[in-house]
Image: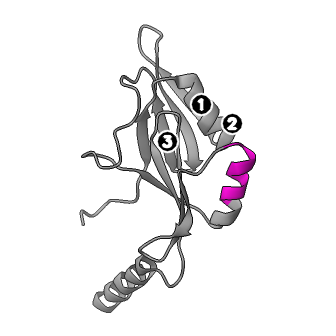
Amino acid sequence: MIKGFTGLGHVAIRAKNIDASLEFYKDKLGLEEMLRLYRDNGDLWLIYLRLTDDQYIEIFPFGVGEEAPPREATGLNHVCIAVDDVDSVVAQLAEKGVPLISPLKEGADGNRQAWIADPDGNRFELMQMRGDSLQYKAIRAMHEKMAATA
């Protein structure tokens, strides 16, 4: 890996209807708007929504087309949001009227997951990592290997 990588900073999404997207991300998911950037002519360029202090979702207006490409299309497939209690998150989303596009289940990697989509059809995996999942075991093995070679 290139030295200096520190994490994933943001995901940028182009929205067809900025008002519908902001209703979803702010009102339903509870993300806070951090700032807006405007072009020199005054047109809205993008909106930053806070996921964590150093992870954001950028929403760009003026998307074209009816919805995000289908799951099988080449390119970005989905965004995964890590959660500490997927049952609680799913219950909160249900209270806000956000339906699951795939039922809550255990994924092939052993983590618990649920799926939602924004108004443009962009897919989000909500993942609760379990201590016996393949990802967790792989992370632990990588840390042990790094510690042994340090």
Q: Residues within 10 Å of mark 3 (few under 14, many from 20)?
A: some
Is residue 54 in the magenta section?
Answer: no
Residue 140 screen position, x and y as percent: 42, 84
Mark earlier in primary sequence (3, 1): 1
Task: Magenta stretch: give its range.
Answer: 89-97
29 vs 5: above or below: above
Viewer-proximal residue, 5 or 77? 77
Q: Residues within 10 Å of mark 2 (few under 14, many from 20)?
A: few
Viewer-proximal residue, 41 or 22? 22
> Which residue, given by chain and number where applicable, does mark 3 sit on?
57
Mark 3 residue type: Ile
Q: Quadrant of the N terminus?
A: bottom left
Report how far apart the C-alphas of labels 2 and 1 lie in the structure: 7 Å
Mark 1 residue type: Leu
Mark earlier in primary sequence (2, 1): 1
Viewer-proximal residue, 66 or 142? 66
* Circle number at residue 22: 1
Q: Main secondary structure of the magenta part?
A: helix
45 vs 91: above or below: above
125 vs 97: above or below: below
Report how far apart the C-alphas of labels 3 and 2 lie in the structure: 15 Å
Mark 2 residue type: Asp
The answer to whether residue 89 is left or right of residue 55 is right
In what element is the residue under mark 3? strand
The answer to whether residue 76 is left or right of residue 62 is left
* Circle number at residue 39: none
Report how far apart the C-alphas of labels 3 and 1 lie in the structure: 11 Å
In what element is the residue under mark 1? helix
> Which residue, given by chain and number where applicable, does mark 2 sit on?
27
